[in-house]
Image: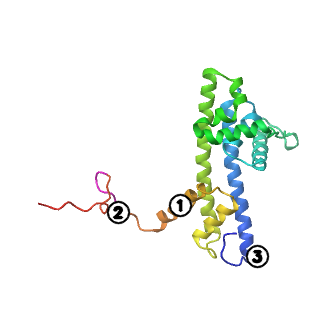
Amino acid sequence: MALNRNTTRALQRQIDLTTAVCQERLLATHVRHVLALVDLVSPEIPFDSALDIYARILRLSPEQARNVGSRALASIGHRGGLHEAEEPSVELMEDDATDREDARAAAEAGPGGRFDAIFGRVRRRIRGRVHDKLRDRINLATARAEDSLFNTHVENALIFARALSDEVPLHESVDLYLEIMAVPEGYSDVVFNRALRTVADDTLPPLAPARTGGRDAAAEPPLPTA
């Protein structure tokens, strides 16, 4: 834990409650974007494959993918009027040697090549213009999802800061959130800075307006006169 202090029982309970709230908000964000992706790629790609695509591109753990898939299926079931007892279960693709090789290729390919690198089996089934349009839709949808998840992380970090503000400084609360949620290094730095920037905008005096032409008045001294 990132706290540099003994954690009281009351503080630990507040941390646990706030963690649960933040996890639910992240899950809701994932489900919203999975459902959007499923709608975008239907009928070319079935639900299970669309979920697998989403989980791999967004780097979800198997447990996260199952939770997201189950919640998304439940939402689809409710749309169709299914009752809770009738809701189907989700089965993800097995992580066999081929899938692991695809994942390694995707990491080397970067965002632009993720679809082709990870989903060679889909590529072989769907070719030509249909494949290109499908790939573009998936790349756009997952980019939108990643941006939405980033915003959710920033909002969650601020929820943590407010919940613990009586006992924990702002920067420690945000660090604690990032640690509990296992936000990757690098990505976590951006979330940390954005969260603190949000607080700064709300609490600090506003910055002086920039000069006409886009340069700050203090950025460059005036030229000497002849």
Whether residue 51 can be seen here? no
Magenta stretch contains residue 211 = yes
Of the two numbered discs 2 and 1 on the same chain, state the one appearing first in sequence: 1
Residue 126: name its quadrant: top right
- Looking at the picture, which amino acid does disc 3 mark? Arg
Q: Bin the neighbour count of mark 3 within 10 Å (Cα to Cα): few under 14, some 14-19, many 20 and up.
A: few
Q: Bin the neighbour count of mark 1 within 10 Å (Cα to Cα): few under 14, some 14-19, many 20 and up.
A: some
Of the two numbered discs 3 and 2 on the same chain, state the one appearing first in sequence: 3
Magenta-colored span: 208-213
Q: Quadrant of the C terminus?
A: bottom left
Q: Is residue 15 left or right of residue 187?
A: right
Residue under label 1, please give it: 193
The CA distance from mark 1 to mark 3 is: 29 Å
The CA distance from mark 2 to mark 1 is: 21 Å
* Label 2 SS: loop
Between 54 and 205, which is closer to the camera in this rendering?
A: 54
